[in-house]
Image (cartoon, grey):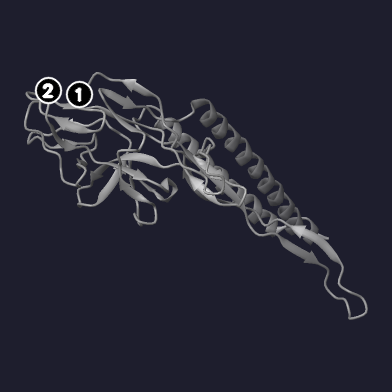
Amino acid sequence: MIRGLYTAAAGMLTQESRHDTAVQNLANINTPGYKQVNSVARSFPEMLLTMLGGTSDVPVPTIGKLNTGVFAEEALSIYQQGVIRESGKTTDFALVSDMELKDPATGENIRFDGSGKYVNADGEVFYKPEAFFTVQDPNGDIRYTKDGSFKVALDGRLLTSTGYQVLDSNNRPIVLTGPADRFKVDEQGYVLNPATGARGARLGVSVVGQPFQMVREGDGVFRIDDPQGAGVRPVGGTDRVEVRQNYIESSNVDASEAMVDMNTALRAYEANQKVIQFYDKSLDKAVNEVGRV
């Protein structure tokens, strides 16, 4: 009976985590560049129950398997591109990327699923490469973001909406010398001279080959603990990545899906709560009524 309490309690904690994830997605539905998070649950290892006793002549009978509960294992970000909408601001940028990857077994272009994942016939797992703006946090560490709603500081530095420094292709801060309303960037990310049209610094755009190794830090940025293992590299000339000025990438949150997840988690939480209440009443009777007999 006590084991059942633990199992139901684990279910409540898991559904609470799932509910919080859905609420987080809904709260950021209008956040530029926000990537939807999906909560992943996994059951604890099953136990094989057998009866006590038995001898060498009479084997111990097997009762069956017992599930020991569930837990929220992790939260996975979905990097599918959000809607690109026009904002009209010269300091707004969106990355339009549709990079291809070939299956080494067949030599054909991979068709990724909605989460950006593909498993071939040999069991090899591939992830769709994604492009991110390269920024620097206040501590000087490299971070990555899809939020291109930039702003210009008084000293000309190009910053993210949360104050992170926007870097160029050489990981150096971008500093504008002219007025922000004359700030022009071409489709490859080069800053253009407003008078001559000559190319200057290039917006730092990084391609991440293993985006599921990215760690969400808040403020719309991600960190990568092992850049080499995650396949981080500067965007190349053959990559299908385009920088669009005066545009912004919207959140990729599916509002309908988030609402369904939130309500489903709430109903499952209530069901586990009822189970705990049942066990509580059973224990109450066992202690206060059966004990009197």
Crowdedness near tag 1: few (<14), some (14–19) or many (≥20) residues, C-alpha within 10 Å? some
User: Quick one: which residue is furthest to the front in this view?
Assistant: 107
Q: Which quarter of the image is occupied by the C terminus?
A: bottom right
Type of residue at label 2? Arg
Q: Residue 119, position in %: x, y?
A: 57, 46
The residues tagged by marks 1 and 2 sit, at their Cα atoms, a distance apart of 8 Å
Instruction: Give the residue at x 82% y 72%.
Output: 52
Check disc 2: other Cα within 10 Å, few if <14, some if 14-19, many if 20+: few
State left or right for residue 43 relative to residue 112.
right
Q: Earlier in the sequence, mark 1 or mark 2?
A: 1
Residue depicted at x 60% and y 34%: 264
Q: Nearer the viewer, residue 46 or 116?
A: 116
Residue 152: x %, y % from top left: 14, 32
| Of residues 266 and 286, the one drawn nearer to the viewer in this rendering | 266
| Outermost bottom residue | 56
Judge left or right: residue 144 versus residue 252. left
Disc 1 designates what residue? 90
Q: Within the image, what quadrant is residue 77 found in?
A: top left
- Which residue is rendered at x = 18% and y = 31% of the image? 151
Amino acid carrying label 1: it is Thr
- Of 155 and 179, nearer the camera is 179
Q: Disc 2 marks which residue?
A: 182
Q: Secondary structure at mark 2?
A: helix
Residue in view at x 42 percent, y 48 percent:
210
Quarter in which the N terminus is drawn = bottom right
Using the image, tell me which numbered label, if any, was put on residue 188.
none
